[in-house]
Amino acid sequence: MVTFLSGGTGTPKLLRGADDVFPPAETTVVGNTGDDVELGGLLVCPDVDTVLFLGGDVLDRETWWGIADDPATTTEELHRLAEAAGLESGPRYLPEDRQTDGRRIARWRRFSGVAEFMHIGDRDRAVHLTRTSLLDEGHSLTEVTRTLADAFDVPWTLLPMSDDPVASIVHTPEGPMHFQEFWVGRGGEPTVEDVEFRGAADATATDAVLTALEDPVVVGPSNPVTSIGPLLAVDGIEDALRETPVVAVSPFVEDQVFSGPAAKLMDAVGYDPSTAGVADAYDFADAFVLDDADGTDLDSPVVRTDTTLDTEADAARVARATRDALEAVR
């Protein structure tokens, strides 16, 4: 049995080639929900859904977001209506008093659906509509995720990190903004002063997550700050990681990040944007998988390989290195 911590695209890219190394029936994936937003009244769980769609073999592997070949008729009409009515496009937050009113799971991350700033296909939207409706019927996010995973025939056990809301808020000179505004709406351009995981102090890991973390854990090569950071901020998760074997795959080659805003965000929260900084952030990890070209000297055991994840064959190679690292620390 093994449990993967997943966020962004790094861990899903690793998972797509890991089946022969880590049998899906014996694998649990705990997904980041700090990036979740309520958009036009629907709860969107980007990191959980990437794993959901990957497991269902419908993921758009060009963008690593949404469902492949999914028409976006509703999104297109929303933009047409906004333009015709002279309504401003881009991220439109609901008023502050509406951010915490009503549906608790969506706190601090509520956006208007006018001229949506996130591209959502029609099949994708059906997932968000089903999720939100089941939550409104009284089901937990864990229960809803299990239902959706069954509908997509996902081979792994897929769990959200918590049933409580946590919002990744990026602090900038222009003021605080949700990570999705920072990354999707603003292209990651604003200067970052700090990152806050709002609500984490009141969030707890579910029994299902804590049980999964009793197994050996793989921290995939996702963004350490906004993909893995929200999980670590949830009560119970980091403590559990200190009690089980953990291997982390670095998303850096020394000080060069493979993709995304990890370097910028790590620098803002006080970690060196490098493999050494990742090791500092993951001081609970027992071993690391690094790229062959990464000469970083760590105090923990290291397995090196080509950590490129462009193809399924690449992912299988990195999965084998991850297995070797786990075997060294069990």
Image (cartoon, helix red, strand yellow):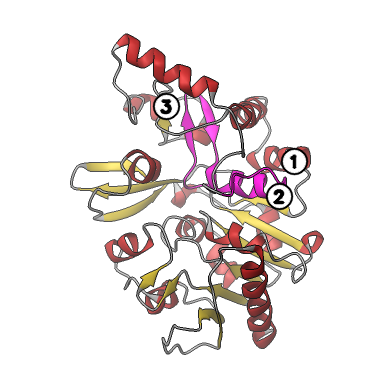
Circle 1 residues within 10 Å: few <14, some 14–19, many ≥20: some
Mark 1 = which residue?
A: 152
Question: Which residue shows up at 63% across the image and 50% down it?
Answer: 51
Residue 60 left/right relative to 109: right
Image point 59% across, 26% down: which residue? Answer: 122
Q: Does residue 150 appear left or right of residue 36 in this picture?
A: right
The quadrant of the picture occupied by the C terminus is bottom right
Mark 3 in CB contact with mark 2 (< 8 angstroms)? no
Q: Residues within 10 Å of mark 2 (few under 14, many from 20)?
A: many
Residue corresponding to mark 3: 116
On the image, the x and y values in percent for residue 183 come to: 37, 46
Task: Name the residue located 43 percent from the left edge and 55 percent from the top edge.
Answer: 226
Amino acid found under the numbered disc labelled 3: Glu
Name the side, left or right, on which 233 lies relative to 261: right
Q: CA distance from mark 1 to mark 3?
A: 26 Å
Residue under pointer 2: 55
Sequence-wise first label, 1 or 3:
3
Please state which of residues 320 and 6 is positioned toward the viewer in this rendering.
320
Above or below 151: residue 63: below
Toward which corner of the image does residue 56 lie, by quadrant? Answer: top right
> What span is colored magenta in the figure?
33-61
| Residue occupying image coordinates x 54% and y 52% | 32
